[in-house]
Amino acid sequence: MTLSSSSNEAADGDGSSRPRLGVVAGGGALPRLVCEAERNAGGDPFVIALRANAGDWVSDYENTVSGPGQVGRIFAALSGAGCGRVCFAGALQRPSLSNVRFDFTALRVLPVMRRLMRQGDDGLLRGLAQIFEARGFTMVGAHELLGELLAPMGPLGARTPNQSDLTDIERAAEIVAALGAVDVGQGAVVARGRCLAVETVQGTDVMLGRLEGDTRRGGAPIPSGVLYKSPKPDQDLRLDLPAIGPETIRRAATAGLNGVAVRSGGVFILDVDETIAAADAAGVFLFGWDPEEGPG
């Protein structure tokens, strides 16, 4: 079915039109929130639901299901739906090339894909974005649609970090910046100046899970310490901004931390009210911080 041009464009606030948005949806709440924001702005998002990743919510939108190796199918679906803009949103487990079924278009770019798969997540996503842009699509960041979910500066909730916590936040920010420079992770845990854990491709939940029940902690008492999350240095903010939610808070508390700090303006706080309530219930702080602003 061919969609009419009026169905493929949405009006901006100034009355101008913009091309239809295609959302390549992985797991978690973020792609659903992106679609809701686009619909609330008068758009009609089209969803590419990545198999075994996106949730049942996609049935609320025009959608098609695709495997990560069906690049030709994805391009054809986006073009057929009249999409001129594309947003990558949600978590995606990096597949093994040996387990991916590639279509003909994917096979044509397979040498590029092999090279990208050997890079970190940011390098991989930058490469994928370039492939989409070469096909004429404009990449859109989730933060452009969900700016209100980006962490503000300062404390959220009842508790605020003390001076020891702020020192740990600064140390964790230095570690995340160093890791991010080599495209490794977006988070670190520091307690009393000691780095207890760093985030790798397994993600934040796995990192925090390793701390649960750990009574050694390099001499740092329980509770103490902070989880800090931030984009990588020079990261393309259209791609893979970090996010936290209520479960992050609960896991941080279970891991014996004093709180969670995030880079203000660079991290999504999903389910904001529930996340703040979870922090208050657990007696931990939730804090937006900018390294350029300095302590406190």
Image: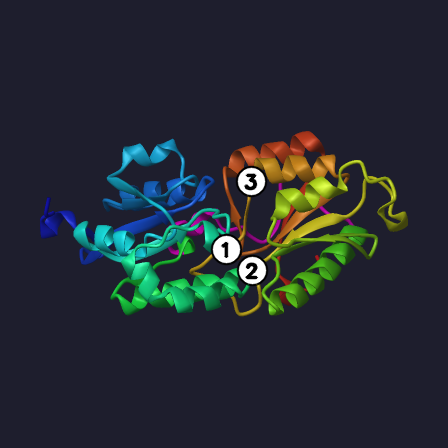
* Magenta-colored stretch includes residue 154: yes
Q: Earlier in the sequence, mark 2 or mark 3?
A: 2
Kindly identify which residue carries mark 2: 231
Kindly identify which residue carries mark 3: 245
What residue occupies the far top of the structure in this picture?
A: 281
Location of residue 216 (image quadrant): top right
Kind of residue indicated by mark 3:
Gly
Q: CA distance from mark 2 to mark 3?
A: 16 Å
SS state under label 1:
loop
Q: How far across and down, in percent of the image, does residue 210 sit?
A: 73, 42
SS state under label 2:
loop
Is 242 left or right of 40, judged from the image as shown? right
Image point (66%, 33%), residue name: 280
Kindly identify which residue carries mark 1: 241
Quadrant housing the C terminus: bottom right
What residue occupies the far right of the structure in this picture?
A: 219
Label pair 1/2, CB-CB below 8 angstroms: yes
Is 55 left or right of 158, judged from the image as shown? left
Crowdedness near tag 2: few (<14), some (14–19) or many (≥20) residues, C-alpha within 10 Å: many
SS state under label 3:
loop
Q: Earlier in the sequence, mark 1 or mark 2?
A: 2
Magenta region: 144-162
Say if residue 167 shows up in the picture. Answer: yes
Image point (47%, 68%), residue name: 115
Kind of residue indicated by mark 2:
Pro
What residue occupies the far front of the structure in this picture?
A: 98
Q: CA distance from mark 1 to mark 2?
A: 6 Å
* Magenta-colored stretch includes residue 244: no
Label pair 2/3, CB-CB below 8 angstroms: no
Location of residue 257 (image quadrant): top right
